Amino acid sequence: MVEEVAFNLIRQAVIYLPEDVKASLKKAYEEEVSEAAKTQLKAILDNIELAERYLAPICQDTGTILFYIAAGAEVRGLDKIEAALINATRKATREVPLRPNAVDPFTQKNSGDNTGRFIPYINWEIVPGDALEITVMPKGGGSENMCIAKTIPPGEGINGVKKFVIETIVEAGAQPCPPTIVGVGIGGGVDVAIKLAKRTLLRPLNVPNSDPILDKLEKELYEAANRLGIGPMGLGGKATVLGVHINYAFRHPASFPVAVAFNCWAARRASAKIYPDGSVEYLTHKGVE
């Protein structure tokens, strides 16, 4: 059951963009004034339509496969889930198909099936209940190359966070294939900050931050980023980012970690929940096989 659902999620994620991402791209196209930018956004929207029509991956870079597992505390058989996810990744590589993207950093040898040491990477969370929720996020290399984490002087505070985020977007330029979704993690340690930044990319673009302080900061950074003029694919225009998502953890008094993670315009994700009776609810791609 887990293997089948995970396979379906990978297939859904690499072929069909979530509706909130598609709606944001269409809105960006409608509001864009630069002809070069509109041309790029039109090409992106055509690409999305063709992927759905021909059941082909949205992008030739089908990414590194990341799983986020929210396992109910009463779920049995958790020791078998990792193997099921690995098998699903191998099957998806053969049958969707996916481009093999798992390379040994020492030998430079590609495994050929998108699996290897710690890949697919599985993030675990234990939650109340008896259901198992699986989310897959295929993460492309272009956006991943621009992810960064550092510690800023604590005295700089949130103004230092704003400065770092905007500078990071400027330095990234066209490389993460804008318009992007930008995730920001604040606090914890550096490892916590980058996990928060990447995980917040999973929040739909049409769901506001539940924390009013973070919601205000997200809007401020969104507007600032879209005044930069980087635009779609770095060719100028209004739409540099589709959204900025922020989360935070408490920090040590002597350190102030900040991390920025990017998703390209092909912000792929898919989720499903498996219930104890064996029924499955597909959460992000309802009606898509």
Image (cartoon, rainbow, N blue to C red):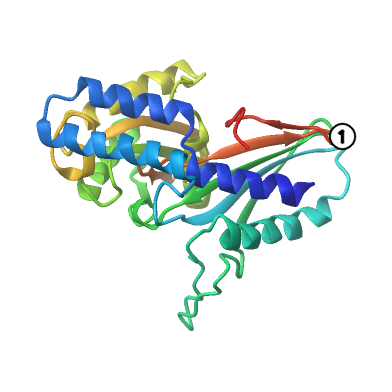
- Point out residue 229 in the picture as x, y percentages from the top left corner: 14, 34
| Residue 174 to residue 41: above or below | below
- Point out residue 287 in the picture as x, y percentages from the top left corner: 62, 28
- Point out residue 206 in the picture as x, y percentages from the top left corner: 45, 21
| Residue 59 to residue 21: above or below | below
Q: Pick out the residue farthest to the bottom.
A: 107
Q: Identify the image quadrant of the C terminus.
A: top right
Please count the marks in the image: 1
Q: Pick out the residue farthest to the front.
A: 54
Which residue does the image show at 48% across and 81% down from the upper left? 106
State the residue in front, 184 or 239: 239
Whether residue 284 is visible, yes or no, is yes
- Judged left or right of residue 44, residue 174 is left
Which residue does the image show at 87% across and 50% down from the upper left? 77
Dot 1: few (<14), some (14–19), or many (≥20) neighbours within 10 Å?
few
Whether residue 253 is visible, yes or no, is no
- Judged left or right of residue 58, residue 136 is right
State the residue in front, 264 or 152: 264
- Judged left or right of residue 39, residue 11 is right
- Judged left or right of residue 144, residue 239 is left
- Point out residue 95 in the picture as x, y percentages from the top left corner: 59, 58
State the residue in front, 251 or 197: 197
Residue 112: quadrant of the picture: bottom right
Q: Report helix, strand or loop for mark 1.
A: loop
Q: Hey, what amino acid is under mark 1?
A: Pro
Which residue does the image show at 13% across and 37% down from the upper left? 236
Which residue does the image show at 58% across and 31% down from the upper left? 284
The residue at which mark 1 appears reads as: 276
